[in-house]
Image: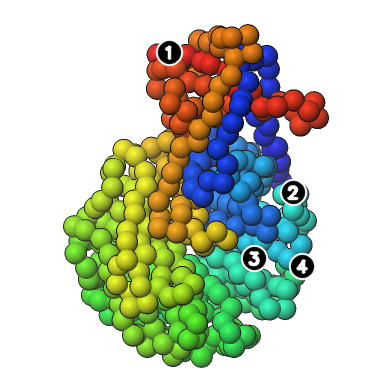
Amino acid sequence: MTRRLVVRGLLVGLFTCSLAQVASGQTSWWRTFGDSLADNGNAVRQTADGGYIVGGSTASFGAGATNVYLIKTSATGDEVWTGVWGDSMDEGGSSVLQTADSGYVVAGYTGSFGAGGHDVWLIRTNAQGGTVWTRTFGGGGGDQGNSVAPTSDGGFIVAGYTWSFGAGNADVYLIKTSAAGDTDWTRTYGGASGDEGYSVQQTADGGYVVAGVTRSFGAGIADVYMIKTDATGGVIWTRTYGGTSNDEGYAVRQTADSGYIIAGYTSSFGAGNQDVYLIRTDAAGDTLWTRTFGGNLRDWGNSAEAVVGGGYIVTGATRSFGAGGQDIYLVMTDTAGDTVWTRTYGGTGSDEGNSVQPTADGGWVIAGSTTSFGAGNADVYLIKADANGYVDVTESFQPQARSGKCAATVIRVLPQDAVAFDAMGRRVLKTRPGVYFVREEPPASDGKSPTVRKVVVTR
């Protein structure tokens, strides 16, 4: 197994301008991470130090076609370290959480290790991203972990799917582990056709709730599937939601009244050929209401959270609205599921939101992927929005010349780690030919202040 830990510094050198002021206290920004190949952010959590941890996959770094990718950032989204895990086959991270000791757990899949073609992969790290242990779960078929959550005994619960065990082609796979990652028990759920689990959470009664998709039961080709279990994975009840077409659930959360909220997509209802699908149930899984969001094209929800004070937040993707072929879609609702506001983020390429979480300042952080911005054909896309979903990407400074003038350097491409501002002092994340000021940090050990140099980007 190869694993790489990267602590990436900013640029260091001889500069002709000094930095006088950088705006602080910003509540919103966006960042991209990756290189020339496909890199994706599938999960995000705010960390105890106010920063963020992003889990996903990378084809730009590591030993295989894709590797598990973990990115730790500061509170302002600047990279602190990255970790890459994998070998010669495909690996990816689907879900991440922070542990009580400030380490991390990532759930996903591996093709390089384990018993089968793909196995569920659980990786435990310390606070700096160093590997503490890894575990694989599965058999001779294809198995994958899509969601990991902490349990009240200090262990972990993982939901995904298995082709190795169960009743059908694919079954929902639920794995309970100890704090050391050792198996306490495993369970499968489903029928003769394909069934998959995408989201899991421990419930207030000590049991678990899983949301996903079933092709074995329900009214249509595929239906949203919710399973409520006891503390040992025994089924208490199952429910399906949807119509005669394709409907899938990608996120589930228990609500304050012990009911549930599920987000996903529906092709059975709504305005287009696929809409965001939001389902609110009571504690027994019976439907209280459903809502759809979207336009006449394809729209879907990947992640949902209950909002403190009432309401729900959902992120996913939209092809009906926004700036490009596909944009990140953020929907805020009230307690009845009615729209309070919607936001889109992205450019002219393809952008998708895979995870949304509340932040300590009352805003939102979204992780996903972008082909509109960044260094490669897809980059990890991290967005910090304020409470109303707005993103202010400006960051200002006043350059001061040490010798009365600020000489310019002519270059074709800005270095990847450059922090650039335009002539109006606004931070820019994608440069075109023109004049920019690049902020550069000296090593922390030399005691010097940040500097800014003037550059001219040519064609």
The earlier-in-sequence mark between 4 and 1 is: 4
C-alpha separation, residue under disc 1 versus residue under disc 2: 39 Å
Place of residue 106 in the rendered image (x, y in percent of width and height, measured from the top left):
63, 58
Side of 132 relative to 424 (left or right): right
Identify the residue position indicated by label 3 in the image: 137
Identify which residue, 302 or 93, lies in the foreground. 302
Q: Residues within 10 Å of mark 2 (few under 14, many from 20)?
A: some
Identify the residue position indicated by label 1 in the image: 458
C-alpha separation, residue under disc 4 versus residue under disc 3: 14 Å
C-alpha separation, residue under disc 3 versus residue under disc 1: 52 Å
The earlier-in-sequence mark between 2 and 3 is: 2
Place of residue 234 in the rendered image (x, y in percent of width and height, measured from the top left):
57, 87
Eye-nearest disc, 4 or 3: 4
- Of the numbered discs in the image, which one, if any, rests on residue 180? 4
- Name the secondary structure under disc 1: loop
Side of 160 relative to 279 (left or right): right
- Name the secondary structure under disc 3: strand
- Name the secondary structure under disc 2: loop
| Residue name at image x 80 percent, y 26 percent | 446
Q: Residues within 10 Å of mark 3 (few under 14, many from 20)?
A: many
